[in-house]
Image (cartoon, rainbow, N blue to C red):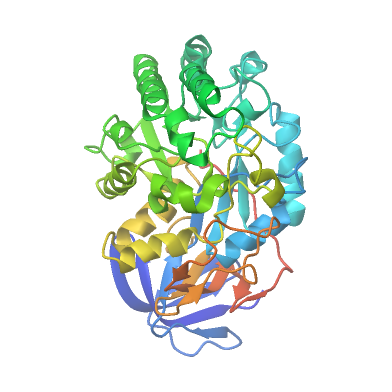
C-alpha cells in the first residue's frame, strides 16, 4: 500500500481546528504536523478543505442477509463511504434474525467479503434466546439489541417486557441497546385511528399513533430498571424533547451507564413534512413535532444526547408507497448524514467540533472501538475530506442506495465529500471508487 500525504488540510479533531499535514502509511496515521516532500507518497492537496475523522454510524440496517432486494452490505457501504461514513454497526433484524453466535459470525463473513467500510454487528436478543445470551461471554460484543426484531413478531420489544428486561439487566454485562416504545399504547392508538380512517390512515397520524407518551413511558421505565440493576443501557433513536431530560449531561460519556442517540432524520424533518413526503418519512419511532426536532438538537449540543446515527433502513419505493399499515417503516440516510449535520453548521446551529464529537469520537468511546474515531498518530487512517463550499442537489442520478431513492431528493446541500479513506485506502475520490480493498471488523477494546 502506497503512503498518502494530505497537505495543508484543516483538521477538526478533539475540540481543535487547525491547518496541518497528515502522513498515512500501511493503514495507519503515521505523522501529523508539517511534513515535507515524501518520496513515493500519493499527495492530496487539502488546501481550503476540512478533514474529519471518518464517521462511525452506530445504527444501520444494511439488509444482508435475507432482505437484499432492498439493499446489501456492498451497495449500502458504498453509499456510506461516499458520504464520509467509514465504519458502521448493523442491527440484528436480517433474515435470519441474528439470535446466535453462529448467525453473527456469518454476517461478519459476508461483510469481510463485501463491505467497503469497517463493520460491526449487534447480537439480537428477545424472549426466544435470552437464556443463551445471559450465559455468553459478551465482553467482545459491541452490544446486544432488540432493534427491528419487532418486525418479526409482536412481543419482541424489550421495553414492552419489563420481566425480560430485568432478567437481561441482572445478568448481561454488555451494552443493552433497545428500541424504546410502549407497544400497548401504540396498539390502542392504532385501533382508534383505524376506526376513523380504516386502512388508509394518513401519514400525518403516524406520530400520534407512535406517540410521545408511548416513547416517554417506555424510556422512563427502562432507565429506572437499568439504574436499579446498575446495567449498561443505550436507548436507540430518541425522538422527543421530553425524553431528553431523562438523560444526564453532568458527567463525561466515559462515566455514563445510561446513554442515548438521535438519528439525523429526527433532526431534519418534522411533522410538517408528512404532507409533502407522506409514507416516505414513516419511521419507527415516528418523526414528531417542530418543538421535538429543535429540542433534540439542543439536547445533542448540551450533551443529554451522546451520538448521531442514521438508522439507515432502505425499502423499495413500492414497499413504502402502500397504505398506512402495509407501508414499511424506515428510509435510507447513510449517504447524506454528514451533509445534514454540516448544513446545521452552515446555519449556525452547531459547531464543527460538536459534530465530530457526536459522529466520530463518541461512538468509538461508547462502544470501546479500538484505534478509530480520532485523528491520532498510531490510529487507523479512517478520514474524510470535505469541501465546505460545494453546493449540490440530491437527485436520483447521484443517489447510491440500492433502493434508488431518498426522502432528501431535491435538497440542496452546501458541502461535499471529496475523499474518503478507510484504513489508509483511498476508497472514494471525487465520485470515483477504488474497491480493491475491503473494510475491517471493528475490534472492541478489552
Q: Residue at x 48, y 66 (%)?
A: 411
Q: Report the number of numbered marks.
A: 0
Instruction: Give x and y (percent) for residue 112.
Output: 73, 52
**Which one is nearer the viewer's eye here, 74 or 290?**
290
* Residue 79, above or below 34: above
Please provide percent x and percent y for residue 263.
45, 46
- Which residue lies at the image location 53% right of the left edge and 13% below the top edge? 164
Residue at the image point whose x is 52% and y is 38% from the top: 202
Looking at this view, is 376 or 256 the one in front? 256
Quarter the N terminus occupies: bottom right
Identify the residue at the far left of this view. Answer: 250
In the image, is 430 to the left or to the right of 107?
Answer: left
Is residue 171 visible in the rendered image? The answer is yes
Spot occupied by residue 55 in the image (x, y as percentages of width and height): 49, 58
Q: In this view, does 426 lie above or below 109?
A: below
Answer with the quarter of the image where residue 435 lies.
bottom right
Identify whether 164 is placed above or below 324: above
Expressed as whole percent of the image width and height from the top left, the position of residue 210 reads 46, 30
- The reply to whether residue 422 is in sight is no
Judge left or right: residue 3 versus residue 414: right
Amino acid at each position: 500500500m502506497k503512503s498518502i500525504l494530505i497537505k495543508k488540510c484543516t483538521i477538526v479533531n478533539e475540540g481543535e481546528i487547525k491547518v496541518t499535514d497528515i502522513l498515512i502509511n500501511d493503514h495507519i496515521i503515521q505523522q501529523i504536523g508539517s511534513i515535507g516532500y515524501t518520496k513515493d507518497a500519493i499527495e492530496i492537496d487539502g488546501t481550503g478543505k476540512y478533514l474529519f475523522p471518518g464517521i462511525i454510524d452506530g445504527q444501520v440496517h444494511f439488509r444482508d442477509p435475507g432482505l437484499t432486494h432492498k439493499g446489501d452490505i456492498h451497495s449500502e457501504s458504498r453509499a456510506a463511504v461516499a458520504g464520509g461514513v467509514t465504519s458502521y454497526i448493523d442491527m440484528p433484524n436480517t433474515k435470519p434474525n441474528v439470535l446466535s453466535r453462529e448467525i453473527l459470525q456469518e454476517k461478519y463473513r459476508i461483510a469481510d467479503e463485501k463491505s467497503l467500510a469497517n463493520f460491526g454487528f449487534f447480537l439480537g436478543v428477545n424472549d426466544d434466546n435470552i437464556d443463551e445470551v445471559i450465559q455468553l461471554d459478551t465482553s467482545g460484543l459491541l452490544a446486544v439489541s432488540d432493534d427491528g426484531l419487532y418486525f418479526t413478531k409482536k412481543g419482541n420489544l424489550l421495553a414492552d417486557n419489563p420481566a425480560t428486561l430485568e432478567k437481561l439487566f441482572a445478568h448481561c454485562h454488555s451494552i443493552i441497546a433497545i428500541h424504546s416504545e410502549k407497544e400497548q399504547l401504540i396498539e390502542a392508538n392504532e385501533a382508534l385511528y383505524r376506526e376513523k380512517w380504516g386502512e388508509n390512515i394518513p401519514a400525518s397520524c403516524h406520530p400520534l399513533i407512535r406517540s410521545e407518551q408511548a416513547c416517554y413511558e417506555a424510556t422512563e421505565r427502562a432507565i429506572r430498571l437499568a439504574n436499579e440493576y446498575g446495567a449498561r443501557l443505550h436507548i436507540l433513536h430518541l425522538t422527543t424533547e421530553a425524553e431528553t431530560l431523562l438523560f444526564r449531561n453532568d458527567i463525561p460519556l466515559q462515566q455514563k451507564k445510561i446513554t442515548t442517540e438521535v438519528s439525523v432524520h429526527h433532526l431534519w424533518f418534522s411533522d410538517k413534512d408528512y404532507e409533502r413526503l407522506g409514507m416516505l418519512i414513516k419511521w419507527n419511532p415516528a418523526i414528531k413535532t417542530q418543538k421535538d426536532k429543535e429540542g433534540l438538537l439542543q439536547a445533542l449540543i448540551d450533551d443529554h444526547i451522546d451520538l448521531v446515527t442514521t438508522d439507515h433502513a432502505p425499502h423499495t419505493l413500492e414497499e413504502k408507497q402502500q397504505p398506512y399499515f402495509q407501508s414499511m417503516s424506515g428510509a435510507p440516510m447513510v449517504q447524506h448524514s454528514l451533509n445534514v449535520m454540516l448544513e446545521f453548521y452552515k446555519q449556525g446551529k452547531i459547531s464543527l467540533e460538536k459534530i465530530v464529537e457526536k459522529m466520530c469520537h463518541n461512538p468509538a468511546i461508547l462502544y470501546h472501538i479500538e484505534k478509530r474515531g480520532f485523528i491520532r498518530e498510531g490510529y487507523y487512517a479512517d478520514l474524510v475530506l470535505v469541501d465546505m463550499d460545494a453546493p449540490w442537489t440530491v437527485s436520483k442520478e447521484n443517489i447510491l442506495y440500492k433502493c434508488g431513492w431518498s426522502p432528501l431528493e431535491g435538497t440542496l446541500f452546501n458541502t461535499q465529500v471529496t475523499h474518503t479513506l478507510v484504513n489508509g485506502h483511498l476508497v472514494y475520490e471525487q465520485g470515483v471508487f477504488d474497491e480493491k480493498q475491503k473494510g475491517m471488523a471493528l475490534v472492541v477494546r478489552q
